């Protein structure tokens, strides 16, 4: 879209975010650091969180069938695009409980955000303020009501196209941005009232009572690791209770003994409320907000993201019925399973007034805190805005209704089981490849693209050619195995890098500094740094490594040799031969010169030798790690080359040449031998490979022939 030609309208130009992403990449080489494809996002978050965070965010009730039903329900409703409609001026704005908001999207209440990012709820609350979208705070939050309100106002304090849409004509509050309070209602009314009053005073003017979670659902993947943050040392999740004067007055002492006191008594207490209690709550809340009428004004159509009742109906499946029953009398907020602009569109078309998203923003902040949360939410808004224009629907409130959809009862989400398996394999590789690509290596982009093509081909092949199913499966099997290896190497690479950087952490100087760096030292050091940079430039953040390296070397060389050396670590007095082991360029002085110099500065040869020993030991560690990095990187290049080779026949493009130049045939054979040892007779395969390699002398041919051979090897049980 041409940003100089923005049509005026009530709605922010969210679609321009797409352009910004493209420009950041195209002009400045800055790519998003994670995928906003929700399947990929759900997958990559595994690597960003520890088990507690990951499983709490992603666990579902039982076998996860309700979660699946949520997504399947979206699949069955199809949008009917309309062409040649004037969508130049679009309108996503809507109204909810007196708040005019820029788009019909809310931040769902999600508890325990500190599991995902150290600042917890402050992060999404701030981003919601930036976007002017309602933020709903959970009673199970890990930040206080007052702090969250502050973060939300902070986000809203800088005005932009999105949050300046917000206006309020209700009776509530003092908030700069719309914020709602989700209540888990305990059985101590005084505590409930205290929470409501705090929320009200902090500008939360809508109360959302959650009625499906008096008790957490049975979530096996949380059970497996006893995943209940409250009972662990340094518990998180008590912040709401600890900051509540009524709760603390009643139970403060008990909380010291029992960290579960807050959650077990006031949040997930296990004792059901019934409809009889609701008028009381409304009265209390209404009393607080001084509203005109009594009665619930809205309903959230949700199944808690499939986390409570397993095997339940998908949330979207029941939306039309609920809309038919009360849609004209109440505000309907929909959630559970919203991942894309199309999902928002479908829920609105089926009668919701707004939707909430939960996991999506959790995954975003788990990746990159504020920036990640902002990125997923802006992406969702852009996705919706763009969908509106490409599908020909200018106004979300006026044009998007059931006529925009067609129901298809026969859909299967997402694809056949086998295709699904392959996709599951594809996702991690794709992410790894993206990681590499962001290091600006053209070749990696190539892997990613060709991988996609290959994947599509595989899926097609699978669907179309049942008679060759067996052969195809053999290939797919191999393909996946090979991908698994790449993945392993990538992980190893990262570990190695971390290990490397960690090993470079400079020791704290604990000795008197004297200047003893000779020009030879400096020369050696700078040569070494250059070499290091060169070798690592393809795989690591070179400047960080270089900085770390420089500082360790500096501290090693500029720090004085100890005057009093610990006798236990001190090496024996050297004999002349040991001096000759010094490498050229490292210290360019003869033992005699060194001795006289060290004598001048009161530092004896044994100490200096000790220092040199240390220096060399640390250097040796570095080179050992470097060697391993090298080995791994060769393996990766090798694998990349294979993939490329495999997809493009024997015409090896430039980047494969790189691989060829660093990998000898022996290494290829060894690597493949390792790779294949679980399925074939490794020695035979290796011998075969070496022979082939010798005969053809072109590595690419080896791989091509290897494929055939492998199929034979497996079928024939080599
Ligand atoms: C990790 C997680 C924590 C949640 N915590 C709460 C909560 O504290 N209170 C609540 O009412 N709902 C909670 N929910 C439900 C969400 O408010 C919302 O219904 C759900 O996330 C929407 O589905 P989605 O994640 O597919 O968008 C939670 C959901 C998730 C995934």
Image (cartoon, rainbow, N blue to C red):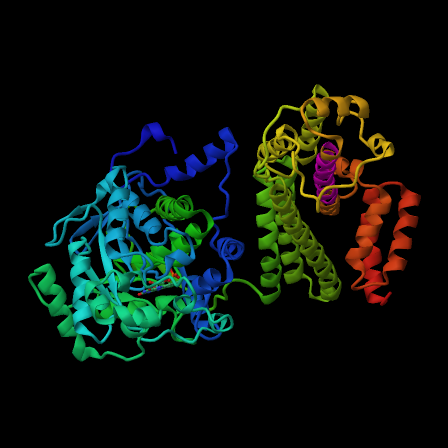
Where residue 424 sits: x, y (%)? 58, 59
The answer to which quarter of the image holds residue 320 is: bottom left
Identify which residue is drawn at 35% across, 67% down: 304
Q: Is residue 609 magenta?
A: yes
The answer to which quarter of the image holds residue 57 is: bottom left
- 71 lies left or right of 182: right
> Which quadrant would the N terminus be assigned to in this image?
top left
Q: Is residue 243 magenta?
A: no
| Residue 644 appears in view | no
Front one among 38 and 559: 559
Identify which residue is drawn at 35% across, 30% down: 3
Where residue 92 sits: x, y (%)? 28, 47
Q: Quadrant of ligand 1?
A: bottom left
Placement of 698 over or under 205, stated as above or below: above
- 295 lies left or right of 577: left
- 555 lies left or right of 578: left
Where residue 562 sits: x, y (%)? 65, 35
How many numbered discs? 0
Placement of 364 over or under 165, stated as above or below: below
Front one among 701 and 613: 613
> Which quadrant would the C terminus be assigned to in this image?
bottom right
Front one among 352 and 337: 337
The answer to which quarter of the image holds residue 567 is: top right
Front one among 84 and 4: 4
| Residue 31 appears in view | yes
Which is the main secondary structure of the residues drawn in magenta?
helix
The residue segment tinted magenta is 608-629
Where residue 392 sits: x, y (%)? 34, 46
């Amino acid at each position: 879209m041409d940003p100089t030609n923005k049509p005026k309208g009530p709605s922010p130009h969210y679609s321009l975010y797409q352009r910004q992403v493209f420009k950041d990449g195209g002009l400045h080489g800055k790519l998003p650091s994670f995928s906003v494809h929700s399947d990929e996002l759900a997958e990559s978050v595994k690597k960003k969180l520890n088990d507690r965070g990951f499983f709490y965010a992603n666990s579902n009730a039982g076998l996860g069938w309700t979660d699946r039903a949520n997504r399947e329900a979206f699949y069955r409703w199809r949008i009917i695009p309309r062409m040649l409609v004037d969508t130049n001026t679009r309108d996503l704005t809507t109204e909810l409980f007196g708040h005019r908001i820029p788009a019909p999207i809310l931040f769902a209440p999600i508890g325990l955000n500190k599991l995902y990012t150290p600042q917890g709820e402050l992060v999404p609350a701030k981003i919601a303020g930036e976007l002017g979208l309602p933020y709903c705070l959970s009673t199970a939050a890990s930040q206080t009501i007052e702090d969250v309100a502050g973060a939300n106002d902070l986000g809203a304090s800088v005005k932009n196209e999105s949050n300046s849409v917000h206006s309020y004509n209700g009776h509530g509050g003092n908030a700069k941005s719309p914020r709602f309070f989700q209540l888990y209602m305990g059985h101590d009314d005084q505590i409930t009232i205290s929470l409501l009053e705090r929320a009200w005073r902090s500008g939360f003017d809508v109360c959302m009572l959650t009625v499906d979670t008096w008790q957490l659902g049975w979530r096996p993947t949380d059970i497996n690791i006893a995943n209940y943050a409250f009972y662990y040392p340094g518990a998180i999740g008590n912040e709401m209770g600890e900051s509540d004067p009524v709760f603390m007055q009643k139970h403060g002492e008990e909380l010291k003994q029992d960290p579960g006191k807050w959650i077990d008594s006031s949040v997930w207490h296990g004792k059901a409320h019934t409809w009889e209690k609701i008028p009381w709550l409304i009265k209390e809340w209404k009393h607080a907000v001084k509203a005109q009428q009594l009665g619930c004004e809205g309903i959230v159509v949700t199944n808690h993201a499939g986390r409570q009742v397993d095997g339940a109906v998908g949330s979207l499946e029941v939306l039309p019925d609920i809309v038919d029953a009360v849609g004209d009398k109440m505000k309907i907020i929909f959630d559970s399973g919203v991942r894309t602009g199309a999902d928002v569109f479908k829920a609105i078309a089926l009668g919701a007034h707004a939707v909430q998203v939960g996991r999506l923003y959790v995954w975003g902040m788990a990746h990159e805190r504020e920036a990640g949360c902002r990125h997923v939410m802006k992406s969702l808004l852009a996705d919706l805005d763009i969908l509106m224009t490409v599908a020909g629907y200018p106004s979300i409130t006026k044009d998007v209704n059931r006529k925009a959809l067609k129901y298809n009862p026969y859909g299967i989400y997402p694809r056949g089981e086998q295709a699904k398996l392959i996709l599951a394999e594809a996702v991690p590789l794709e992410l790894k490849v993206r990681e590499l690509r962001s290091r600006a290596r053209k070749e990696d982009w190539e892997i990613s693209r060709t991988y996609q093509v290959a994947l599509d081909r595989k899926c097609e092949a699978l669907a179309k050619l049942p008679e060759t199913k067996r052969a195809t499966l053999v290939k797919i099997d191999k393909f996946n195995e090979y991908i698994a290896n790449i993945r392993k190497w990538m992980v190893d690479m990262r570990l190695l890098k971390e290990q490397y950087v960690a090993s470079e952490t400079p020791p704290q100087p604990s000795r008197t500094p004297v200047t003893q760096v000779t020009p030879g030292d400096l020369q050696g050091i700078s040569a070494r740094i250059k070499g290091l940079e060169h070798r690592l430039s393809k795989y690591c953040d070179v400047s960080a490594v270089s900085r770390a390296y420089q500082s360790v070397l500096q501290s090693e060389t500029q720090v004085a040799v100890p005057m009093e050396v610990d006798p236990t670590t001190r090496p024996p007095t050297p004999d002349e031969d040991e001096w000759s082991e010094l490498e050229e360029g490292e210290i360019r002085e003869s033992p005699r010169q060194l001795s006289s110099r060290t004598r001048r500065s009161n530092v004896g040869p044994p100490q200096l030798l000790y220092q040199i020993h240390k220096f060399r030991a640390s250097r040796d560690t570095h080179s050992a790690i470097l060697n391993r990095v090298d080995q791994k990187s060769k393996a990766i290049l090798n694998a990349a080359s294979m993939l490329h080779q495999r997809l493009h026949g024997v015409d090896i493009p430039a980047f494969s040449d790189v691989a060829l130049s660093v990998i000898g045939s022996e290494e290829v054979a060894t690597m493949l031998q390792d790779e294949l040892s679980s399925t074939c007779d490794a020695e035979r395969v290796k011998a075969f490979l070496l022979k082939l390699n010798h005969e053809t002398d072109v590595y690419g041919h080896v791989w091509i022939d290897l494929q055939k051979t492998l199929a034979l090897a497996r079928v024939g049980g080599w």
